[in-house]
Image (spheres, rainbow, N blue to C red):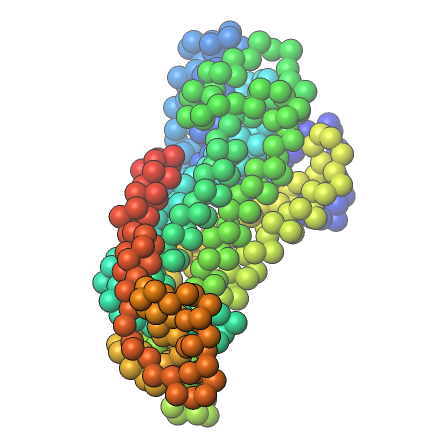
Amino acid sequence: MKLWSKGFEPDKMIEQFTVGADRELDMRLARYDVEGSMAHIRMLESIGLLGSDELPVLLDALKDIAAMIERGEFEIGEGIEDVHSQVEFLLTERLGDLGKKIHSGRSRNDQVLVDLKLFMRDELAKTAHAVRSLFDLLLDLSEKHKKDLMPGYTHLQVAMPSSFGLWFGAYAESLADDMQMLIAAYRIANQNPLGSAAGYGSSFPLDREMTTRLLGFDDLHYNVVAAQMSRGKTERAAAAAISAVASTIGRLAMDVCMWMCQNFGFVSFPDELTTGSSIMPHKKNPDVFEIMRGKCNRLQSVPNELALLTANLPLGYNRDLQLMKDIIFPATTELRSCLEMCEFMLHHIRIRENILDDERYDYLFTVEDVNRLVLQGVPFRDAYKQVGMAVQEKRYKPTREINHTHLGSIGNLATGRIRAKMEGLMSVFPD
């Protein structure tokens, strides 16, 4: 059934090509389509386009459809184009002509827009909470291992002393930065487009502020053309946030893969959380983190894919925009899967103690010894040369004394400050 049918049916090849995977993807929008329709008909009743006796009948029918969706019994029937058609078909099937009234003052353009806004708002909030959960674990690990030292590297060369506390805490605070991106995307998504119709408004006196309140949006897209232009912009903002989080998780996964290597041997996991080799009996591979790294790298391509899809579109709705669902929907699921798996694995991480006792890490302490001389009154350049010559002549012996006290250093991780930063950011999202 086509809502736009005018007495003819399109060629089957045309229908298959244009509808694509929309029926399957639209199943994720079903509950939001009902939610948007309930707000819309309440508004229609308030402006006289539905009778006061008709509204409760329609609301009860929509509540029944919502219950079907929650029970997993809702399906988009064969030959029905999308979720919007299916909901309206069910209403018309049950209520006759009354079911046909719900589309007054609305286009499928703003109908799908409000569905997508509600969907993206929820997905971004769920992602934010998943990020927060991993963040909390990372900070807990940071505190737990704040005295466990490890090498720090620049250019993959031994550089200066670090600690597992510093390492875990770094990724926690990086997630706080990523949360800023999620907030920006959430705020863009949390604006009501309903009432923009096909992108140019309606001659009905629609109360757009009422639907904004009913749907719990923070604000609305006031200009109806701007509302339609938000299709694509919302997804691109969400994709940028997804990419930012994926970048952090992918980098953490790379570190773990490297630290598990026997040449480092800094971390390990229980045998059952690793995989083996078909030929080498000693192997315990970090496959989980390698897959995680690969998935996160792919997720970082999502903004570019959406940018290319929407790059040269003219003003107004264009069917190309339908293809965004097939890009952004799986991305939200994939990212949360990576976040949850990362958290699961880190609950079981084992770190090696006393790493810096190994003489291969002696040079980690050169800066410490330069600074110690400076504190004794030696000019920095002279102290640097003195220690540098000892290294060059292979007579350097480290003191292995570490005294880092400034905010954010090994001895002062600022865990509480970082946690407070995240708590402030999370206040944007509903619990």
Measured as percent of width and height from the top left, residue 237 is found at 56, 41
Residue at the top extreme, as displayed: 48
Residue 14 falls left or right of residue 207: right
Any part of residue 98 in sight: no
State the residue in front, 245 or 114: 245
Measured as percent of width and height from the top left, residue 228 is found at 64, 29
Rendered-image quadrant of the C terminus: top left
Residue 260 falls left or right of residue 99: left
Give me the residue at 44% from left, 47% from top. Answer: 177
State the residue in front, 285 or 254: 254
Rendered-image quadrant of the N terminus: top right
Give me the residue at 26% from left, 76% from top. Answer: 353
Any part of residue 423 in sight: yes
Measured as percent of width and height from the top left, residue 86 is found at 54, 35
Residue 40 falls left or right of residue 105: left
Give me the residue at 51% from left, 51% from top. Answer: 244
Give me the residue at 28% from left, 64% from top. Answer: 403
State the residue in front, 242 or 143: 143
Measured as percent of width and height from the top left, residue 369 is found at 35, 72
* In this view, 415 is above or below 401: above
* In this view, 386 is above or below 417: below
Residue 401, picture quadrant: bottom left
